[in-house]
Image: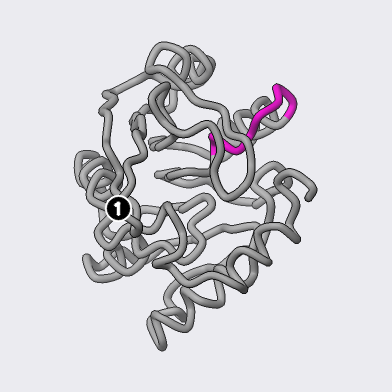
């Protein structure tokens, strides 16, 4: 198996339902709480990195947000989300891309990433991701990643775990930390995964 390959993720979303995926959340509470804390207008441009078939987009649409982009490496994942949303899928921009290869021509008020960043396990992937984030974020960054207490592998792939100090140090070039929280995510099969969630504001450094 090739680590982080598109084929890997296409196979995951083709062969497994949400209740078979450890990261599935019925209500993405931490993500929504951070987004609400920014007091955004409904026209704010929001990018959900690695959104897959997450339900975050459902809640954002339900709250009236008008400029939502969901990016994922897996077309199968996005197809599932579109099917679930029905006609509301037309209100969302859908992008099939590896985040390290993403080159849009506009900026975003919010960059949200729950459970993508920790799959970047070498320095080149991390630096490419952060270069892209610095170019594209005009407002806020939300990252939810496995904490030091989180699992060492996910979906058959190794991950990189972070302490609050390690994550904020990685992001200090370009972003000022607002706050971080720890969250125990209960998987659909009733196991615990400890996440570190941080919100940061883009600076001009």
Q: Nearer the viewer, residue 146 or 128?
A: 146
Q: Nearer the viewer, residue 90 or 84?
A: 84
Say which element carries label 1. Answer: loop
In the image, residue 111 sits, relative to residue 177, either above or below, namely: below
- Bin the neighbour count of mark 1 within 10 Å (Cα to Cα): few under 14, some 14-19, many 20 and up: few
Magenta stretch bounds:
117-124
The residue lying at 48 percent from left, 57 percent from top is 51
Q: Nearer the viewer, residue 100 or 137?
A: 100
The residue lying at 42 percent from left, 21 percent from top is 148
Q: Tell me how the rendering is colored.
A: one colour
Residue 66, percent from left and from top: 35, 66
| Residue at image mark 1 | 190
Q: Residue furthest right?
A: 2
Residue 132, percent from left and from top: 63, 36
The residue lying at 42 percent from left, 76 percent from top is 91
In the image, residue 13 sits, relative to residue 154, either above or below, namely: below
């Amino acid at each position: 198996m090739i680590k982080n390959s598109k084929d890997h993720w296409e196979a995951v979303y083709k062969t497994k339902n949400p209740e078979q995926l450890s990261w599935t959340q019925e209500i993405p509470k931490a993500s929504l709480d951070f987004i609400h804390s920014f007091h955004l207008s409904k026209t704010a441009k929001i990018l959900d990195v690695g959104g897959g078939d997450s339900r975050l987009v459902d809640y954002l649409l339900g709250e009236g947000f008008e400029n939502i982009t969901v990016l994922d490496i897996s077309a199968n994942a996005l197809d599932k989300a579109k099917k679930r949303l029905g006609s509301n899928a037309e209100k969302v921009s859908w992008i099939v891309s590896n985040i390290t290869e993403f080159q849009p021509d506009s900026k975003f008020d919010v960059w949200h990433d729950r459970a993508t960043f920790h799959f970047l396990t070498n320095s080149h992937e991390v630096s490419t991701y952060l270069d892209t984030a610095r170019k594209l974020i005009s407002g806020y960054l939300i990252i939810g990643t496995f904490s030091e207490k989180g699992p060492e592998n996910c979906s058959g792939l190794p991950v990189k775990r972070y302490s609050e100090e390690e994550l904020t140090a990685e992001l200090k070039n370009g972003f000022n930390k607002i706050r971080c929280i720890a969250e125990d995510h209960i998987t659909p099969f009733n196991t615990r995964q400890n996440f570190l969630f941080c919100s940061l504001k883009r600076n001009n450094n």
